[in-house]
Image (cartoon, rainbow, N blue to C red):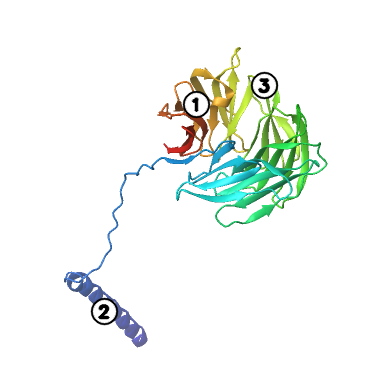
Amino acid sequence: MKILKRVYKWIILSVVLQIAVLAYFNYDYLLKEHEIKATSYEVSDEVQENEKKSVKIEDGTSLHKVSYDGNHAAWLLSGKIHVYDLKNKKSEDIIEGSNGDINYYKWLPDRNIIIYSVSNAAGKINVLTKDIETGTIHDYPVISGLAKNSEVKDIELSPLTNVVYVKVQTSSTRARIYKYDIMDNLSYIMIFDSSSTIKEANLSDKLFYDEGNGRIMVWDGKRKSKSRISTEDKVFLIGVDAEDNLYVGNKDSGGKITKLLYSKQDKESDDKWYEINLKTPCDKNHLFVTKGGGVYMIDKVNKVVINLKNSVETKYEGEFIEILDNYIVYSDNNKLMVDSF
């Protein structure tokens, strides 16, 4: 009993001391004035509007393209890619093919890297990438056994899956699809009509393409099989955004797109198609889907870019070239213009 009493006394004493110390800090120490140093950061809700960026367009140049961040422009001239720093207003790089001319290139959608192809008369094609900031060049395995004068017409790639699909035109009517997987292994996929459009999914190894007669097909790279995209009407491939929403268009009897349909292409989503009605029918090549999910129609007569999701219109001058998530690219008075919107 004496031991228990002694233990209880120590417990009660400990609790009393803790209460006393906390009371001192709460009612005495914290109420006194102390010098406190703090740093204040002012956050502005206003977004400063970027100035228009421009560069003079040389005679004989073609395939003008701008990087995702709007800071670099590029074009083809005499089989070489010329890269220009729009931010610092200076020539930045000239990319040459070691065994032939460069006939196709594009910027990666999320970094300042160019992927391009070099063709030669022997029926071989090299596909490479170059990091504009570091100068690092990466070579993919050579595509060989092609007809003479075969050329790359499109390259689709996903930075998330690291899968690259290459469309090679082998004749006036036929094209082949080749694939580089994440380990750079090269494989032949299929042959199809050279006029067919291809678009790659961002989150999975899938390639969408037109088969003709209003049918859209998907090649599943994991299963190595193809299937038809189910739609009620005949549709035409428009684009795929970063969330793997597939956009297709309905044509009227005159061949104009009157309505856009889109649906997410993954296992978790349902097969429901959502509609975007166009106030004015337009050609297929006047519709653009950006990686960020922007859907735009280009009115080249009135020189207006129309956001089809919120109907906001943005004017431009000169001749339209391309649209990015945050920029409109066009040529005006022999200048390549990059305008933020």
Task: State yes or no: discs 1 and 2 in contact (Cβ < 8 Å).
Answer: no
For the residues labelled 1 and 2, the Cα–Cα distance comes to: 77 Å
Q: In the current view of this chain or complex, which residue is farthest to the top?
A: 253
Q: Which type of secondary structure does the marked residue at label 2 adopt?
A: helix
The quadrant of the image that shows the C terminus is: top left
Q: Position of residue 53 (x, y in %)?
A: 43, 42
Would residue 305 be seen by someone viewing this image from the given angle? yes
Mark 3–mark 2 distance (CA, rounded to whole Å)? 83 Å
Which element is circle 3 on?
loop
**Lower sequence index among marks 1 and 3:** 3
Q: Residues within 10 Å of mark 3 (few under 14, many from 20)?
A: some
Q: Residue at x 76, y 36 (%)?
A: 150
Residue shown at 73%/45% (left/top)? 100
Query: Nearest the camera: 76 or 314?
Result: 76
Q: Nearer the viewer, residue 257 or 285?
A: 285
Residue 13 percent location from the top left of the image: 28, 81
Which of the two marks, 1 or 2, is nearer to us in this view?
1
Q: What amino acid type should be assigned to the residue bearing mark 3?
A: Gly
What x and y, as percent, mark residue 282? 54, 20
Circle number at residue 227? none
- Horizontal side of residue 133 vs 216, given as left or right: left
Whether residue 202 is visible: no
| Crowd class of label 2 (few under 14; some 14 to 19; many from 20; radius 10 Å) | few
View extreme (right): residue:
145
Of label 3 and label 2, which has the lower sequence position? 2
The quarter of the picture where residue 30 lies is bottom left
The residue indicated by pointer 3 is 214
Residue at the spot of label 2: 17
Which residue is found at the position 64% from the left and 44% from the top? 80
